[in-house]
Amino acid sequence: MSAEKENEELLTHIEVKKVLEESMEKPSVIYTGPEEDGGRRQREGEAELQEEPEEDPLQVLSFEKRATMDHVSNFLRIQDNAKSMIAELIKIERVSDVHAFKIAEIMPRDETELRPVFAKDRFTLTPEELKQILDIIDSHRD
């Protein structure tokens, strides 16, 4: 797949947030019929169900949707700080663009959260380099 085609298929954080907000209006459970719904829905022609109290839409979300919404909201909040942080991180010799973007995305708090970003590389960062990266992250954290 070419780089242009791959970029066309990726969504921005704003687009993901919009999709999630639209999905909040849709049910999280697919209706499979009266035999599997435990009698919650009534057959056609019977009396209407009593109205249920309205629930908070964020409480109704599944775990995955709630976690995604939190991640997107947090990333949009720090987006401006992320640009300057990425610029600083790239100045470090062993930190590539990919590393810098991943670090900005996960915002690690300590060395154990930072090391997996560099796990596939054939080098290990020195404790001084790790501390320098964490200091940059902390300076851009809200």
Image (cartoon, rainbow, N blue to C red):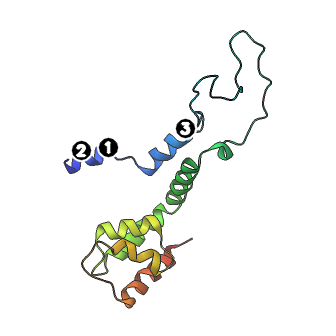
Crowding at mark 3 (Cα within 10 Å: few <14, some 14-19, many 20+): few
Seen at 65% across and 29% down, the residue is: 37
Is 119 placed above or below 101 here? Answer: below
Tell me the CA gap for discs 2 and 1.
Answer: 7 Å
- For the view shown, which residue lies furthest in the left direction? 2
In which quadrant is the C terminus drawn? bottom right
- For the view shown, which residue lies furthest in the top direction? 45
Task: Identify the amino acid type marked 3.
Answer: Ser
Crowding at mark 2 (Cα within 10 Å: few <14, some 14-19, many 20+): few
Q: Which residue is mark 1?
A: 9
Answer with the quarter of the image where residue 52 lies. Answer: top right
Seen at 29% across and 44% down, the residue is: 8
Is 12 placed above or below 113 here? Answer: above
Viewer-proximal residue among 133 and 139? 133
Could you say where residue 55 lies in the image, as x and y percent from the top left? Answer: 73, 39
- For the view shown, which residue lies furthest in the front direction? 35
Q: Secondary structure at mark 1?
A: helix
Q: Which residue is mark 3?
A: 23
Q: Pointers 2 and 1 in contact (CB under 8 A)? A: yes
Is 84 placed above or below 129 here? Answer: above
- Is 105 left, or right, of 43 in this rendering? left
For marks 3 and 1 on the same chain, the one whose residue lies earlier in the sequence: 1
Seen at 78% across and 14% down, the residue is: 47
Could you say where residue 30 lies in the image, as x and y percent from the top left? Answer: 56, 31
Q: Which residue is mark 2?
A: 5
Q: Pointers 2 and 3 in contact (CB under 8 A)? A: no
Tell me the CA gap for discs 3 and 1.
Answer: 19 Å
For marks 2 and 3 on the same chain, the one whose residue lies earlier in the sequence: 2
Task: Identify the amino acid type marked 2.
Answer: Lys
